[in-house]
C-alpha cells in the first residue's frame, strides 16, 4: 500500500500521484535545477506537502555546490585528502571547527568566499600550504609543523632521494642545499624540459629557494631521512641517514646531479649565494615571487663565478 498524504484542499488522506519533475530554484542569486518527485492529489490535482522537506533542501543545496564542482561529500573528501582532522583542517584555514562540522554534515551551506577556498585547495596542495603558511604566526611553530608534516606525509619519494643523493658524503648547510637543488632542477629543465624534484623555486634573500624550505627539511629530519650535525665552526649541516635509491633515476638524471655536485662541491654558502644572485631569473623577480622554469635557458653552471 502506498504512503498516503493529507490533502488540505479535499480535507482527507489520499494516495498521491507521483511524477518526476525538474524544478528551478534560486540559491545565493544563482539558478539551480533539481530533479525531484512531486506529489499531487488524484482528486483536485493540488500539490501535496512532502514530509521529506529536508531531503529536498539537501538536493537543492547540493545542486548549488555542483556549480563549484563540489558537493557536501566532496567537502569531507577534500579535508581527508590532507590527512587532517576537522579541528586541524579548520585551524589550517583560520576557520572554526564548528564551521567544518556544519558543512560536512550538510547543516549549513558554505558562503561564496569559503567555496572559493575549497575550490582552490581541491587537488592543489600548493594552494593549501600557502594558506597554512599565511596562518603560521597565529598557529605557532609547533602546530604549524605538525600540520605540515601530516599534509606532506607522502612527500614525493624521488624528491626525497635527490636530497639523499646530494648529501651523500657531502654534508651541506641549508643555503648550500638550496643552491644544489635549484641548479639540478634548472639544469634538468634546460636540457630535458622537466625538473627532477617536485619543487618550484622563488626569489629568496640568499638566492632561489624552494617553498617552505624550513618545514620540508624539518619533515625530512622527523621522518629520519636526514639528521643535523655541527661542523667545526658550529654551523648546522644536514647529512643523510639512508643510501639513495638509484633505481628512481634514469641515466640523464644521474648525469645532471653529478655535474652539479662536481661544480658546486666545496663552495661556501656565501660564494654560492653571490653566484646565484647573478642568475637572470633571480634578478628579474621580486622577493617571494616564483622563478618560472622558462628562465632555465639563461641558467649556466659554468658562468658568473
Image (cartoon, rainbow, N blue to C red):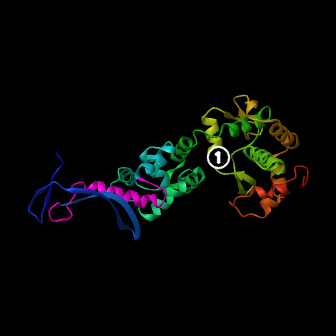
Residue drawn at x 45%, y 58% as measured from the top left: 66
- Depth order, front residue of 191/152: 191
- In this rendering, position of residue 188 left or right of residue 73: right
| Image quadrant where residue 165 sits | top right
Above/below status of 83 relative to 303: above
- Depth order, front residue of 12/296: 12
- In this rendering, position of residue 12 left or right of residue 257: left
- In this rendering, position of residue 301 left or right of residue 180: right
| Image quadrant where residue 217 sits | top right
Magenta span: 42-71
Q: Which residue is mark 1?
A: 214
Q: Residue farthest to the left?
A: 11
Q: Residue farthest to the bottom?
A: 29
- Where is residue 135 shown, x and y percent of the image? 52, 55
- Where is residue 300 shown, x and y percent of the image? 87, 52
**Image quadrant for the N terminus?**
top left
Q: Is residue 50 magenta?
A: yes
For mark 1, give the secondary structure: helix
- In this rendering, position of residue 116 left or right of residue 263: left
Amino acid at each position: 500500500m502506498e504512503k498516503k498524504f493529507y490533502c488540505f484542499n479535499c480535507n482527507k488522506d489520499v494516495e498521491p500521484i507521483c511524477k518526476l519533475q525538474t524544478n528551478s530554484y534560486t540559491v545565493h542569486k544563482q539558478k539551480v535545477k533539481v530533479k525531484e518527485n512531486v506529489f499531487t492529489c488524484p482528486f483536485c490535482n493540488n500539490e501535496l506537502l512532502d514530509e521529506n522537506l529536508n531531503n529536498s533542501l539537501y538536493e537543492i543545496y547540493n545542486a548549488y555546490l555542483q556549480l563549484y564542482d563540489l558537493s557536501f561529500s566532496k567537502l569531507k573528501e577534500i579535508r581527508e585528502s590532507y590527512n587532517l582532522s576537522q579541528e586541524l583542517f579548520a585551524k589550517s584555514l583560520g576557520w572554526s571547527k564548528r564551521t567544518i562540522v556544519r558543512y560536512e554534515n550538510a547543516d549549513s551551506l558554505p558562503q561564496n568566499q569559503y567555496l572559493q577556498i575549497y575550490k582552490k585547495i581541491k587537488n592543489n596542495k600548493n594552494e593549501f600550504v600557502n594558506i597554512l603558511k599565511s596562518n603560521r604566526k597565529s598557529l605557532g611553530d609547533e602546530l604549524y609543523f605538525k600540520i605540515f608534516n601530516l599534509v606532506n606525509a607522502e612527500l614525493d619519494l624521488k624528491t626525497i632521494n635527490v636530497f639523499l643523493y646530494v648529501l651523500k658524503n657531502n654534508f651541506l648547510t641549508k643555503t648550500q642545499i638550496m643552491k644544489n637543488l635549484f641548479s639540478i632542477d634548472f639544469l634538468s629543465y634546460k636540457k630535458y624540459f622537466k625538473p627532477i624534484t617536485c619543487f618550484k623555486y622563488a626569489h629568496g634573500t640568499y638566492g632561489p629557494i624552494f617553498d617552505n624550505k624550513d618545514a620540508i627539511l624539518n619533515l625530512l629530519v622527523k621522518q629520519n631521512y636526514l639528521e643535523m650535525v655541527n661542523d667545526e665552526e658550529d654551523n648546522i649541516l644536514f647529512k643523510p641517514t639512508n643510501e639513495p635509491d638509484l633505481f628512481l633515476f634514469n641515466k640523464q638524471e644521474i648525469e645532471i646531479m653529478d655535474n652539479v655536485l662536481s661544480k658546486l662541491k666545496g663552495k661556501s654558502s656565501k660564494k654560492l649565494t653571490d653566484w646565484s644572485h647573478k642568475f637572470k631569473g633571480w634578478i628579474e623577480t621580486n622577493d617571494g615571487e616564483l622563478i618560472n622554469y622558462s628562465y632555465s635557458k639563461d641558467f649556466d653552471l659554468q658562468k658568473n663565478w
